[in-house]
Image (cartoon, rainbow, N blue to C red):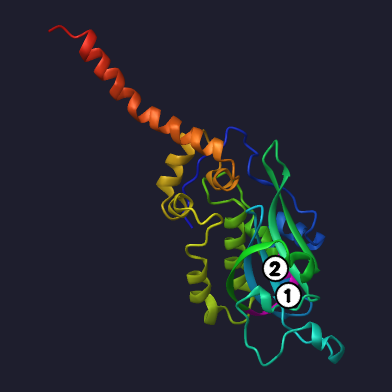
């Protein structure tokens, strides 16, 4: 992840204001920077093996889907994965009535541009219809729900930056932070890093370039008047996009036009 940032004029913009979905003990330990307590919480409770996906919904919003593969009992066998399958790389293979964890960064206040972290459990069938596309990240072994909540807290953006701390970047950082709490992190670390490279929300080249080259993102941010370009490009408002392109074009040719006019009408000879 690049570290270059562009500060917003509003000092609290693009920071997380709400952890209401996070366990109170986890939230308290994280806010107090109690590393010992966080370590205790990350190993408490039942560990599980999860297949982790970054999903994009039809509103171009990214979230993380964590599907557990632990068999609870023979009664639930039809709802869970076959133990013979080591890992799954498609959300279409997830049983419809499996309870899944999903984590995402959402606006708490769109006007103030302040975020909240959403950490919930739902039946997969209630989420499946909203998935436009997905990216398989990896198979995480021996991680518990509180460890994933700690990872979500650590992935929370601390300040406004260009194309680095939107919903997709939160999801990507979350997947990286979860590596510290799974038993097989050494085996999957390289795979996770590879899977996270090149993921975009819109598939537009401008978004991919701005994610890969921070200086391009900063330039685009300045030209767009400090607008978060990923949200802007995914908004689907073609009129705004065309207007910005025309405006950028005029800014580029304006000095040339002025020079030509000065030379033609004011310069002697």
Name the element at disc 1. Answer: loop
- Residue under circle 2? 148
Magenta run includes residue 53:
no
Numbered mark located on residue 109 in the image? none
| Residue contact between numbered discs 2 and 1, judged by CB atoms under 8 Å | yes
- Estimate the x, y position of residue 252 in percent, counting from the top left: 35, 30
Q: CA distance from mark 2 to mark 1?
A: 7 Å
Please determine whether, in this image, residue 148 is positioned above or below residue 84: above
Please determine whether, in this image, residue 240 is positioned above or below residue 117: above
Please determine whether, in this image, residue 83 is positioned above or below residue 65: below
- Estimate the x, y position of residue 151 in percent, counting from the top left: 66, 64
Residue found 45% across the figure and 42% down from its top = 218
* The quadrant where residue 64 appears: bottom right
Residue range (magenta): 140-149
Please determine whether, in this image, residue 47 is positioned above or below residue 170: below
Residue found 53% across the figure and 72% down from its top = 192
Asked if residue 247 can be seen in this view, the reply is yes
Residue found 70% across the figure and 36% down from its top = 111
């Amino acid at each position: 992840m690049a570290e270059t940032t562009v500060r917003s004029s509003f000092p609290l913009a693009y920071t997380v204001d709400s952890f209401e979905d996070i366990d109170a003990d986890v939230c308290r330990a994280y806010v107090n920077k109690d590393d010992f307590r966080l370590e205790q919480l990350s190993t408490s409770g039942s560990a599980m093996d999860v297949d982790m996906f970054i999903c994009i919904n039809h509103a171009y919003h990214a979230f993380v889907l964590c599907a557990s593969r632990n068999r609870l009992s023979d009664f639930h066998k039809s709802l869970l994965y076959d133990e013979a399958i080591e890992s799954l790389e498609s959300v279409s293979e997830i049983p419809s009535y499996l309870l899944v964890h999903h984590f995402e960064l959402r606006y708490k206040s769109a006007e103030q541009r302040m975020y909240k972290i959403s950490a919930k459990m739902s039946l997969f069938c209630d989420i499946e219809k909203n998935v436009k596309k997905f990216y398989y990240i990896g198979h995480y072994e021996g991680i518990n729900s509180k460890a994933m909540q700690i990872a979500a807290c650590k992935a929370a953006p601390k300040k406004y930056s260009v194309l680095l701390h939107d919903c997709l970047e939160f999801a990507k950082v979350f997947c990286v932070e979860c590596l510290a709490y799974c038993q097989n992190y050494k085996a999957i670390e390289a795979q996770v890093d590879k899977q996270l490279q090149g993921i975009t929300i819109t598939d537009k080249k401008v978004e991919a370039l701005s994610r890969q080259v921070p200086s391009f993102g900063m330039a685009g941010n300045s030209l767009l008047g400090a607008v978060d370009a990923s949200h802007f490009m995914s908004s689907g408002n073609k009129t705004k996009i065309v207007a910005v392109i025309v405006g950028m074009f005029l800014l580029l040719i304006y000095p040339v036009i002025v020079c030509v006019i000065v030379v033609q009408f004011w310069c002697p000879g």
